């Protein structure tokens, strides 16, 4: 059946949501096929991890790639070829494929969209919304964890050299310290020789200090205890991927339908989006219903469908920009946003007056959802393309200003 792409910044929570979607679809498929013995659909989750693709393939800095071996981005091309091949092998009208990788290049998404079209199967895109600082925090936490792991392994090797007593215990104790290090915690005194401990604790403190004082803006993120993914290193690899990320545009065929799930979405929110994915992508239901009452609009695309994506996309964009600018203008400041969403010279600007206390993403998302729910039915301009986007932005900004005013 369909091809569902997951996209988002590096370390923004893509695999977490992909796994949840996988579980959701597994249950749903089981429920649908309970009457017959063979399931209606087969489900596949393809990812960098499932194909053992290392994060280092995304590092395009020629300084980090052995130049005599290959051009700087040959390895990323190889990785893409492997992913493409894996999708192509299984995609069919009976197979649902979730592709969990960065999917950050527009042309790549287009290629996959065409592949789905070739086998006459639906296509959808799930974007994971996560503030850059938080995604960076995940990578930092993974860097910290893997450095500690390496350090502990080295110390263990050194310890082994002097004691010589129990060569067989080393491999088992490595696994235990790996778990301790995985929590991203300071070294534990009980695990190590006192001197080694002191040294390693000092190193750890030094690192914390360096990262806090010199590192770029990142949130402190606690990794889940089962998180053993490798970080993107060096840090420039991660930063470049963020820089190169090509935002999905729900107006283009190959980026729609677009579903957005944010880091802070609750299980209920997430399930609602998964239900939507099931209806719109897997069984292809409500799009047809929407089309029925828009029959007079002369367009090859479904304006009703597009409208909802524009509504999601524009409101999401405003939330994102408010959070970005709030960091600069501070509480009670004024955030300025372009009306069309593009930054054209001399363009009309919209202003949001922030309340006296800091607004967080969850609060903004609550307002956004309420606004989306109110305007699902349309604002009467759906057929006019970009006009609708501008009007929507204006209307959401007005809604937010009212809401914030009540809070002051
Ligand atoms: P990606 O696949 O984009 O690299 P992951 O899904 O592996 O990201 O998530 C990175 C880390 O962030 C993991 O430790 C995961 O447990 C945590 N994480 C991801 N999404 C969430 C979320 N919505 N809420 C809390 N923790 C999350
Ligand atoms: Mg992942």
Image: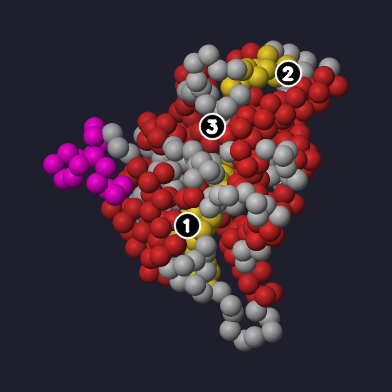
Q: Nearer the viewer, residue 295 or 17?
A: 295
Compared to 408, does 182 lie above or below?
A: below
Left or right of residue 23, residue 199 in this image? left
- Among the two numbered marks 1 and 2 on one chain, the one whose residue lies closer to the N terminus: 1
Q: Residue furthest right?
A: 406
For disc 1, the neighbor class at 10 Å (few under 14, some 14 to 19, many from 20) is: many
Residue 183 at what x, y percent from top left?
Answer: 57, 43
Do we see residue 24 in this rendering?
Answer: no
Magenta residues, as a range? 62-77
Say how many tags the image has: 3
Q: Nearer the viewer, residue 61 or 191?
A: 61
Q: Secondary structure at mark 1?
A: strand
What label sits on residue 99 in the rendered view? 1
Residue at point 44%, 38% (across, down): 246
Disc 2, disc 3: CB below 8 Å?
Answer: no
- Among the two numbered marks 2 and 3 on one chain, the one whose residue lies closer to the N terminus: 3
Residue 267 at what x, y percent from top left?
Answer: 72, 51
Q: Please check the rendered image and state whether residue 73 is part of the magenta-colored stretch, yes or no.
A: yes
Q: Of the residues tagged 2 and 3, which is closer to the observer?
A: 2
Which residue is label 3 attached to?
Answer: 132
Q: Quadrant of residue 105?
A: top left
Q: Secondary structure at mark 2?
A: loop
- Among the two numbered marks 3 and 1 on one chain, the one whose residue lies closer to the N terminus: 1
Which residue is label 2 attached to?
Answer: 354
- How far, Cα to Cα, is label 1 from label 2? 39 Å
Q: Please check the rendered image and state whether residue 110 is part of the magenta-colored stretch, yes or no.
A: no
């Amino acid at each position: 059946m369909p091809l569902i792409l997951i996209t988002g910044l590096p370390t923004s929570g893509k695999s977490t949501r992909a796994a949840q979607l996988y579980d959701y679809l597994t249950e749903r498929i089981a429920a649908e096929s309970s009457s017959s013995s063979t399931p209606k659909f087969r489900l596949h989750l393809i990812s960098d991890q499932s194909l053992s693709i290392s994060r280092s393939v995304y590092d395009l800095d020629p300084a980090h790639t052995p130049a005599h071996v290959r051009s700087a981005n040959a390895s990323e091309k190889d990785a893409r070829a492997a992913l493409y091949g894996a999708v192509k092998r299984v995609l069919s009208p009976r197979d649902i494929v979730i592709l969990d990788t960065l999917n950050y290049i527009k042309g790549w998404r287009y290629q996959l969209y065409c592949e789905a079209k070739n086998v006459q199967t639906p296509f959808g895109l799930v974007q994971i919304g996560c503030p850059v600082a938080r995604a960076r925090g995940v990578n930092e936490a993974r860097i910290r964890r893997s450095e500690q792991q390496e350090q502990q392994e080295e110390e263990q090797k050194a310890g082994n050299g002097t004691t010589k007593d129990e060569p067989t215990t080393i491999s088992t104790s490595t696994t235990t310290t790996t778990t301790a290090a995985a929590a991203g915690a300071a070294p534990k005194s009980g695990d190590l020789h006192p001197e080694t401990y002191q040294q390693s604790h000092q190193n750890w403190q030094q690192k914390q200090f360096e990262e806090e004082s010199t590192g770029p803006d990142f949130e402190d993120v606690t990794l889940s205890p089962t998180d053993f993914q490798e970080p993107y290193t060096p840090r420039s690899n991660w930063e470049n991927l963020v820089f190169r990320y090509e935002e999905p545009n729900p107006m283009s065929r190959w980026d729609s339908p677009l579903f957005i799930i944010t880091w802070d979405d609750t299980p209920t929110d997430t399930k609602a989006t998964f239900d939507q994915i099931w209806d719109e992508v897997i069984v292809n239901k409500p799009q047809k219903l929407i089309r029925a009452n828009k029959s007079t609009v002369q367009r090859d695309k479904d304006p009703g469908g597009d409208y909802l994506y524009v509504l999601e996309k524009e409101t999401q964009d405003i939330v994102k920009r408010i959070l970005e600018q709030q960091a600069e203008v501070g509480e009670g400041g004024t955030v300025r946003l372009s009306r069309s969403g593009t930054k054209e010279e001399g363009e009309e600007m919209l202003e949001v007056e922030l309340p006296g206390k800091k607004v967080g993403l969850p609060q903004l998302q609550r307002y956004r959802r309420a606004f989306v729910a109110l305007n699902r039915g349309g604002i009467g301009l759906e057929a006019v393309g970009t006009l609708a986007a501008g009007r929507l932005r204006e209307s959401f900004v007005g809604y937010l200003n009212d809401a914030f005013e009540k809070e002051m």
